[in-house]
Amino acid sequence: MNDSPRFPDDILWEERQIALAPMLELVVTTRTYPLEQANQALADMPAGRFEGAAVLVA
């Protein structure tokens, strides 16, 4: 048996908004890679070849 509480799927999977983000003037940077270059993205992250998040696109 699993004692974990059950959450409605919409709470777990729908998009979320962080209310403080606009007030903090966050700057988000991403680097996109074609899906075929996923291995390159994984190599670039620890090597520090970019700042921010790597995003794979199909």
Image: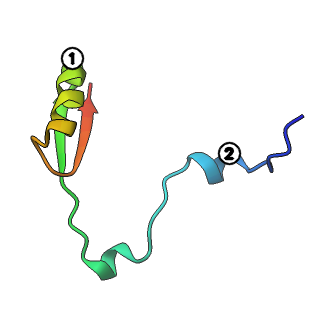
Q: Residues within 10 Å of mark 1 (few under 14, many from 20)?
A: few
Residue at the image position 40 percent from the left and 77 percent from the top: 20
Residue at the image position 12 percent from the left and 45 percent from the top: 50
Residue at the image position 17 percent from the left and 24 percent from the top: 40
Task: Determine whether, in the image, residue 31 is placed left or right of residue 2.
Answer: left
- Please state, as top left, top right, bottom left or bottom right, where the N terminus lies in the image: top right
Q: Residues within 10 Å of mark 2 (few under 14, many from 20)?
A: few
Q: Position of residue 14 (x, y in %)?
A: 54, 50
Residue type at mark 2: give it.
Asp
- Please state, as top left, top right, bottom left or bottom right, where the C terminus lies in the image: top left
**Where does label 1 land, which residue?**
36
How many labels, in total?
2
Write down the quadrant of residue 47 in the picture: top left
Residue type at mark 1: give it.
Glu
**Where does label 2 land, which residue?**
9
Q: Residue furthest front?
A: 47
Q: Secondary structure at mark 2?
A: helix
Q: Position of residue 15 (x, y in %)?
A: 49, 53
User: How does the figure colour the protein chain or chains?
Assistant: rainbow
Q: Position of residue 36 (x, y in %)?
A: 21, 17
Q: Which mark is residue 51?
A: none
Q: Secondary structure at mark 1?
A: helix
Nearer to us in this view, 47 or 39 = 47
Write down the quadrant of residue 35 in the picture: top left
Residue at the image position 44 percent from the left and 75 percent from the top: 19
From the viewer's perspective, is residue 3 above or below residue 19? above
Q: CA distance from mark 2 to mark 1?
A: 31 Å
Q: Residue furthest top?
A: 36
> Of callouts 2 and 1, which one flags the residue occurring earlier in the amino acid sequence?
2
From the viewer's perspective, is residue 20 above or below residue 41? below
